[in-house]
Image (cartoon, rainbow, N blue to C red):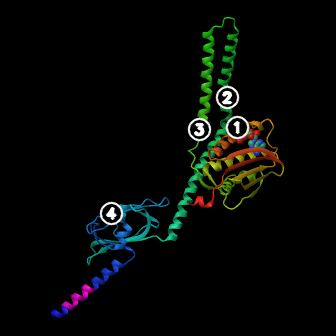
Amino acid sequence: MQDSRRQAQRALLDERAWAGGVVQAASEAIVALDGQGRVTLANPAARTTLAHGLTPGTDLRAVTTFRATLSQAPFDAATFWDSQAPTVLPAGLTLVRESGPVQVEGALTPLRGAQGELRGRVLILREAGALQRRMLGHLEEGERRVREHEEMLAHVSRLSTLGEMGAGLAHELNQPLTAIVSYSQAAARLLDDPEPDLSRVRYAVTASVTQAGRATQIIARLRQWVRRAPSRARATDLAQATQNVLTLCRADLSRQGVQVRTAFPDTPLVQADPVQLEQIILNLLRNALEALHRTPAPLITLNVEGVGETWALTVLDNGPGIAPAVAPRLFTPFTTSKDGGLGLGLSLSQTLAQSMGGDLRGENAAGGALFTLSLPRLALEAASD
Ligand code: ADP
């Protein structure tokens, strides 16, 4: 009798040892918890994955932090840890730990006694595979691009309002300028006097300085309004940026029946702020579109070519070309030949290009206006650093 009981006990112990061995050997993280969420057992994989000793009695909830990616609903830790039914972690969840974040998948399963009472839970985790990590990486990259485009669109719509503001602005600037002219003329006349009244001259000059200050303020306000976030230069595909702008202008191009020809090499990488870069290209494309209003068979040709240490984007149209009156001051603010034009697009674009270490030039070429945007070329290896 005693013998058979001993045998049964040994068999039970063997089975336990075997089960324990399986848990210890598993490559997945396995943590058993009591009803209060305290660790009762953790295998070596769990200690590695969670980067924690997980000694019995550890409150697992206190030492484990999950974070959802941008595309997911925020992770609700309380609901998860208290779940009464088996709960799978949302795909792509990140486990935050001191040694660095890692994407994990897994589940928390309640353990119940014979009467169905909750005895504890078991958490099983494994690190997400390389393929899944890459897919999530792409997903986040996609989200980032959408955000960038939204930012750009917001800015573009601000720029077009700026065009409408042009007339009002000219009026505002005209007042201080007229005042400066008349105060200065008065000062000059007073000085012609054999015995000039210096206090009146001083008054006229001071008033003129005040008005000049007002004009500066108006321009500063305008600048502030136009200014975007500071430049965030990084490896950017010049051809892709151009394509993005073409997509943005597709409706206007087809409404005007403009034919577009492009020739781009594979991945011409430049060091640039992608949003500002698209803003420059958009300005060039808009100007070309406006120049082509009355041109039969309108055509815009966009090429990207390697020129020395730079990639150069050329925008050529077959419109009337740059007017002789405008050509010498093309990049000077407020140079415009358009009714309601503000003459800020090219000067702003050139400033942006130069702040990225590049340049923007404009000239007349066979058949129309040619603008060349050049930016520092980036080697592919440098980009992946
Ligand atoms: P805006 O478009 O408000 O006039 P810009 O700085 O963009 O300001 O352009 C300044 C001027 O340069 C334009 O008014 C126009 O006279 C000339 N210009 C720009 N692009 C072209 C082009 N593609 N063809 C002919 N003229 C152009």
Tell me the kind of residue under disc 2.
His
Question: Does residue 167 lie above or below 381 as drawn?
Answer: above
Q: Which residue is mark 1?
A: 343
Residue 12 sits in quarter: bottom left
Q: Residue furthest front?
A: 308
Q: Alpha carbon of mark 1 to alpha carbon of mark 2: how far?
A: 15 Å
| SS majority, magenta | helix
Q: Of helix, strand and loop, which one carries label 1?
A: loop
Q: Is residue 196 magenta?
A: no
Q: Which residues are magenta?
A: 6-14
Q: Which residue is mark 2?
A: 171
Q: Which residue is mark 3?
A: 225
Q: Is residue 292 visible?
A: no
Q: Alpha carbon of mark 2 to alpha carbon of mark 4: how far?
A: 65 Å
Q: Which residue is mark 4?
A: 61
Q: Is residue 81 visible?
A: yes
Quadrant for ligand 1 reads top right
